[in-house]
């Protein structure tokens, strides 16, 4: 009888420990993601104020730099994906670098939109992101099927968007923006659930800090894409 009581107490302690560890991991992951968003906002603000003349003059004289700015975060994101659990500190630094570069990118494209467009897009994307992240974190429903469909749709959207770069159709861009919002809304919930499940399965085998950075990157990219898509929708709606 004593053995049964001891086993039950041990099982209870293990459950409580797992829940506490999960809560700490999720807090750390969302904290990293929020910090990345803050860094993007700060770098965008500085680009539009303190360094506006230097940055915009340089970009106007070196048009190819825009492609480099767009490609660098891709390389850094891949580096985080492959190295996060092996080198958490370097991965965190790369995450901050990604967020700073995206902040500069936002500043460069902001001239095409009004302050009202940007504010509306940020508030709306924040509301969508928070809602879906919470849902993905707490729901018992398996979202892997929805995530797989959304990923496949994203690949198709990327290919179609590349084609539209040559067609330059505003109507197609407008439609694609709505599709992108739907895709990344689904991916937000799926990524939140996926990182939760990864922690529960492998949290005691890998660096929790690195895992938190990897999850923060995925969620940050989801948020960024929702924001950009909504910004395009609000901006094009005003012009129409």
Image: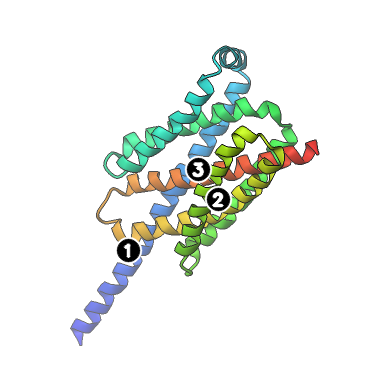
Residue 152, numbered label: none
> What residue sits 33% from the left and 69% below the top?
15
**Residue located at (60% from left, 15% from top):** 60
Residue 28 sits above or below residue 14 on the image: above
Q: CA distance from mark 1 to mark 3?
A: 30 Å
Q: Residues within 10 Å of mark 1 (few under 14, many from 20)?
A: few
Q: Give the left or right position of residue 38, taking residue 98 as reference.
A: right
Q: Nearer the viewer, residue 172 or 225?
A: 172
Residue picked out by circle 2: 184
Tell me the element at label 1: helix
Which tag, 1 or 3, sits closer to the chain's start?
Answer: 1
Report the side of 147 relative to 181 (left or right).
Answer: left
Q: Residue at x 55, y 30 (%)?
A: 103
Q: Are marks 1 and 2 in contact (CB under 8 Å)?
A: no
Q: Could you tell me residue 94's position as x and y percent?
A: 39, 33
- Bin the neighbour count of mark 2 within 10 Å (Cα to Cα): few under 14, some 14-19, many 20 and up: many
Where is mark 3, residue-wise? 221
Whole-percent x, y for residue 194 in the image: 42, 57
Separation (CA) of disc 1 from disc 2: 32 Å
Point out the tag, 1 or 2, that comes first from the N-terminus. Answer: 1
Identify residue for label 1: 17
Residue at disc 3, secondary structure: helix
Name the secondary structure under disc 2. helix
- Local crowd size for mark 3, using a 10 Å CA cut-off: few (<14), some (14–19), many (≥20): some
Q: In terms of sequence position, does the residue under pointer 2 or pointer 3 come before the other?
A: 2
Q: Is residue 72 above or below residue 22?
A: above
The quadrant the C terminus occupies is top right
Can you see residue 206? yes
Q: Quadrant of residue 22?
A: bottom left
Residue 223 position within the rendered picture, expressed as x and y whole percent measured from the top left = 55, 45
Residue 21 in view of the camera: no
């Amino acid at each position: 009888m004593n053995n049964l009581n001891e086993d039950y107490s041990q099982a209870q302690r293990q459950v409580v420990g797992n829940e506490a560890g999960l809560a700490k991991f999720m807090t750390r992951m969302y904290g990293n993601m929020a910090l990345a968003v803050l860094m993007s906002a700060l770098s965008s603000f500085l680009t539009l104020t303190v360094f506006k003349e230097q940055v915009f003059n340089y970009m106007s004289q070196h048009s190819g730099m825009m492609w480099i700015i767009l490609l660098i975060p891709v390389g850094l994101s891949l580096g985080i994906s492959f190295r996060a659990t092996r080198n958490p500190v370097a991965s965190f630094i790369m995450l901050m670098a990604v967020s700073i570069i995206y902040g500069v990118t936002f500043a460069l494209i902001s001239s095409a939109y009004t302050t009202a467009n940007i504010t509306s897009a940020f508030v709306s994307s924040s509301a969508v992101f928070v809602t879906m992240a919470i849902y993905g974190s707490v729901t018992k429903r398996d979202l892997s099927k929805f995530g797989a469909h959304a990923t496949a749709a994203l690949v198709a959207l990327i290919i179609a968007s590349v084609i539209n770069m040559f067609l330059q159709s505003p109507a197609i861009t407008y439609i694609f923006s709505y599709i992108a919002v739907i895709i990344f809304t689904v991916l937000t919930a799926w990524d939140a659930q996926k990182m939760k499940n990864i922690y529960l399965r492998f949290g005691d085998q890998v660096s929790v800090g690195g895992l938190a950075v990897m999850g923060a990157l995925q969620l940050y990219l989801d948020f960024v894409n929702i924001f950009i898509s909504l910004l395009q929708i609000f901006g094009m709606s005003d012009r129409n």
